[in-house]
Amino acid sequence: MTMRLGLTSTPDRIDALTVEAARLDFDAVPLPCIRVDVTPGGVASLAAAVSDADVLVITSARTVELLGSAGLPQLPIVAVGPATANAVEDAGGDVVWTGSDGIHRLADEAQGLLVGRRIIVAGASNTASESVEQLGRTARSIVSVPLYVTVPVAPADDPVDAVIFGSPTAVVGWLMSRELSHLMIGAIGGTTAAALRERGVEPDVVPEGPGFTNTIEGMAARRLERSAP
């Protein structure tokens, strides 16, 4: 029997993830748990701030998308993870460092590159304060420029056997209307896993390399373990 896998990202992301899920014999169930609201004037604020910066930290692939026709600033770019780095490179940006999993690790991993530098952080306003706190330990100065905010949304009640979360906001959205008992649970990285653990839920799968594809593959491996005699 094919396992029904709930995908909790935004509808535009879920379309692509459905293909990945089907490849590994999951029956993908779209259950969006977040909404993205663009910050008015965010792109203009970023453009105005770059002249006083040495390094740009980009926290998500969505940030790159929202810059759109404005393009990426001509600064060395530190990407919070591999998916973000790929988006930056596809857009013609200069990635000088790629973190392994979230802003908390990036602060330690790229410390030598960031120490004493003037840093701009571009991403979601949800994580702005954490970014400033983590990276500000080594920076000469740090400015956070929010381009969007993720808002939790209660999902539909379609039945699933498993679910993947791509952000703490999605976890909050899910718990607005549903429970997590008796489900196989995947978290795409350490930050999302921490959000689940804060609520007393231990994820079954947290991939070593963060991202939706790796998580779906990890869920497929765990499914085989559970079905083995």
Image (cartoon, grey):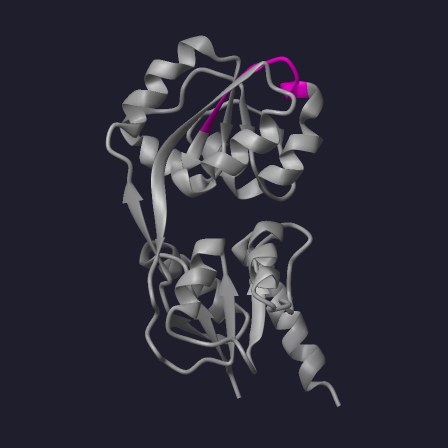
Q: Residue 155 location, x and y as percent? A: 35, 69
Residue 8 visible in the current orientation? yes
Give the mark count: 0
Image position of 66 (left or right of 165): left
Q: Is residue 97 left or right of residue 44?
A: right
Determine which quarter of the picture holds residue 122: top left
Q: Residue furthest left?
A: 40
Q: Of residues 170 and 212, which is closer to you in this image?
A: 170
Quarter of the image where the C terminus is located: bottom right
Residue at 42% over, 30% down: 91
Which residue occupies the foreground of this view, 132 or 183? 132
Q: Residue 138 at x, y = what percent?
A: 65, 21
Percent position (x, y) of residue 145?
A: 39, 27
Q: Residue at x 51, y 65 (%)?
A: 164
Residue 150 magenta-drawn?
Answer: no
On the question of residue 167 being in view, the answer is no
Q: Is 116 part of what is drawn in magenta?
A: yes
Q: Residue at x 50, y 75 (%)?
A: 26
Say whether residue 176 is left or right of residue 53.
left
Q: Is residue 218 above or below residue 42?
A: below
Locate residue 19 relative to residue 42 in the image: left or right.
Answer: right
